[in-house]
């Protein structure tokens, strides 16, 4: 008995406290919700930011997060409602205490969409829109250096200190998009990003996850075009059920879904019996 206590005590003492926070629970529309953005807090510090849609910048400050605590920013894809606040973070970062390199994780290129390296070049490169901040892509930066980290559409895994990041390509019309699996302190959190989930990649990535954050952007009876971009409530239930996730968060809530929440829950419940939360801005969910 004494031995067991001796062995378990350090684990309890050093267990990390992990919290998920939604910064933006909305989509690309004018609404009272910020666009897509999420934080993962570890022991009271915001260590991970996923997506940086419009409004994320303000919500980040409201949450009490600090840019100097971020291990990286990960972008699921380069639609405006997932990425447009990034330059504002970089300018504000100049006035922060951050000096460490900040990795920006993102996707490969396709069609009109640049890859993550090119995206940062087009923003901050010498011929970029914000060329006046071009030193941020170099070690000579006045504040800190941005470092693009590119993930292809296959299954990938990379360590960032005590965080293991898994990625895989997900279907989102013809837009290059990836889902992220964040592994930290024995917990697994999945950010699906925008996807129709028409492949099984998300199910494979999310196996046994503690939290799965998916986007409730369309009602079940949405049109063909919308369904190529976004996952239906019925499919959300299938994905969460097949992946056996513990908790499901429905975010990226668009106006066309307002009023159809009960119908969506019924459809999701056909295949999923775990906890379901409706996302709202600045909502905090402890991950125990
Ligand atoms: Zn999108």
Image (tube, grey):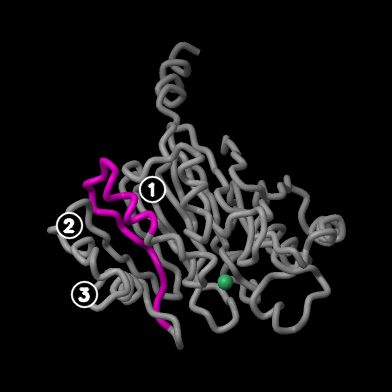
Please report contact status of discs 2 and 1: CB closer than 8 Å, yes or no: no
The residue at which mark 1 appears reads as: 163
How far is the residue under mark 2 from the one under mark 1? 26 Å
Judged from the image, the secondary structure of the residue bearing numbered disc 1 is: strand
Comparing 53 with 286, the one in front is 53
Q: Earlier in the sequence, mark 2 or mark 1?
A: 2
Where is 59 relative to 252, above or below?
Answer: above
Kindly indicate the quadrant of the structure image that contains residue 213: bottom right
Q: Earlier in the sequence, mark 1 or mark 3?
A: 3
Span colored in magenta: 88-109
| Crowd band around label 1 with a 10 angstrom C-alpha radius: few (<14), some (14–19), many (20+) | some
> In the displayed structure, does residue 19 sit left or right of residue 86?
right
Q: As drawn, which residue projects farthest toward the front?
A: 132
> In the displayed structure, does residue 145 sit left or right of residue 205?
left
Please give the name of the residue rendered at 58% of the width and 51% of the height, measured from the top-left corner.
209
Please give the name of the residue rendered at 55% of the width and 44% of the height, measured from the top-left corner.
21
Kindly indicate the quadrant of the structure image that contains residue 33: bottom right
| Crowd band around label 2 with a 10 angstrom C-alpha radius: few (<14), some (14–19), many (20+) | some
Q: Position of residue 86 (x, y in %)?
A: 40, 60
Q: Earlier in the sequence, mark 3 or mark 2?
A: 3
How far is the residue under mark 3 from the one under mark 2? 13 Å
The residue at which mark 2 appears reads as: 141
The residue at which mark 3 appears reads as: 126
């Amino acid at each position: 008995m004494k031995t067991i206590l001796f062995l378990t005590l350090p684990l309890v003492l050093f267990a990390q406290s992990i919290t998920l926070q939604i910064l933006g629970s909305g989509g690309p529309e004018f609404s009272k919700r910020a666009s897509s953005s999420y934080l993962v807090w570890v022991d009271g510090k915001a260590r991970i930011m996923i997506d940086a849609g419009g409004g994320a910048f303000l919500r980040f400050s409201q949450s009490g997060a600090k840019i100097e605590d971020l291990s990286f920013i990960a972008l699921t894809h380069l639609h405006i409602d997932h990425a447009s606040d990034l330059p504002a973070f970089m300018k504000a970062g100049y006035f922060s205490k951050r000096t460490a390199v900040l990795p920006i994780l993102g996707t490969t290129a396709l069609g009109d969409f640049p890859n993550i390296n090119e995206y940062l070049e087009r923003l901050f490169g010498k011929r970029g829109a914000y060329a006046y901040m071009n030193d941020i892509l170099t070690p000579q930066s006045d504040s800190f250096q941005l470092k693009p980290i590119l993930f292809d559409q296959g299954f990938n895994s990379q360590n960032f200190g005590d965080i293991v990041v898994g990625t895989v390509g997900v279907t989102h019309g013809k837009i290059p998009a990836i889902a992220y699996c964040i592994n930290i302190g024995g917990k697994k959190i999945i950010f699906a990003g925008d996807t129709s989930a028409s492949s099984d990649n998300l199910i494979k990535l999310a196996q046994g996850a503690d939290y799965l954050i998916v986007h409730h952007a369309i009602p079940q009876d949405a049109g063909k075009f919308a369904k190529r971009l976004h996952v239906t409530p019925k499919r959300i239930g299938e994905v969460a059920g097949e992946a056996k996730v513990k908790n499901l968060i429905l975010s990226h809530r668009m106006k066309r879904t307002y009023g159809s929440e009960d119908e969506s829950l019924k459809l999701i419940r056909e295949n999923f019996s775990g906890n379901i939360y409706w996302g709202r801005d600045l909502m905090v969910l402890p991950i125990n």
